Image (spheres, rainbow, N blue to C red):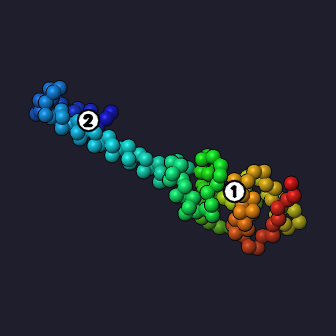
Amino acid sequence: MTARENMRQVLARCGAYRLAEDCPLQWELAAYGAGFDGLKGALAQGEQDAFALTASPERLTEWEALCLPASAACGVRDRREMLAARLSLLAHRGPLTMGDLPTLLLAAGIRGTAIEEGGVVRVAPGEYLLPPALAQQELGRLMPLHLAWEMAEG
């Protein structure tokens, strides 16, 4: 239901107004309705852009500028997933475990796997969402300092 229809229903139930089709009251309701409908659209867009996973591509670029070293040259879905992973790391409480490493890899711009062998975490990249050198640099920044890690040879 549009804002105009809602206001018209409320006024009709009140019974105090003449709601003929072509009268100044209808014109006024049309004007209010146009304003409220525009506001509704702007609020819906604002709500969508407030969250990284639903942001428009333009706002997604702004989110990336705040949280990532570079905008990924991949699709919007991959960009959103990488940004969501980065934001989840910012909110993470407690120590990182091996179970957290897929999220950490994605936050660095790498889709891949990580396994521990002999006290060293070996990262096997499947796909880079950032340029490989930048993704590896980001991984180094995000990995816990006490954790030895290396990139597996492809």
Q: Which residue is mark 1?
A: 130
Task: Classify 147 as above or below 153.
Answer: below
Residue 107 point in image, percent of width and height:
66, 58
Residue extending furthest right? Answer: 118
Tell me if I can see residue 141 in this picture.
Answer: yes
Which of the 4 quarters of the picture holds residue 6?
top left
Residue 129 point in image, percent of width and height:
69, 53
Label 1 – label 2 distance at C-alpha: 48 Å
Residues at marks 1 and 2 touching, judged by CB atoms closer than 8 Å = no
Residue 73 point in image, percent of width and height:
65, 52
Number of residue marks: 2
Q: Residues within 10 Å of mark 1 (few under 14, many from 20)?
A: many
Q: Which quadrant would the N terminus be assigned to in this image?
A: top left
Residue 60 point in image, percent of width and height:
54, 53
Question: Which amino acid does the dot numbered 2 rest on?
Answer: Arg
Residue found 81% across the figure and 70% down from its top: 148
Q: Secondary structure at mark 1?
A: loop
Q: Which residue is mark 2?
A: 4
Q: Viewer-proximal residue, 135 or 90?
A: 135
Q: Secondary structure at mark 2?
A: helix
Q: Residues within 10 Å of mark 2 (few under 14, many from 20)?
A: some
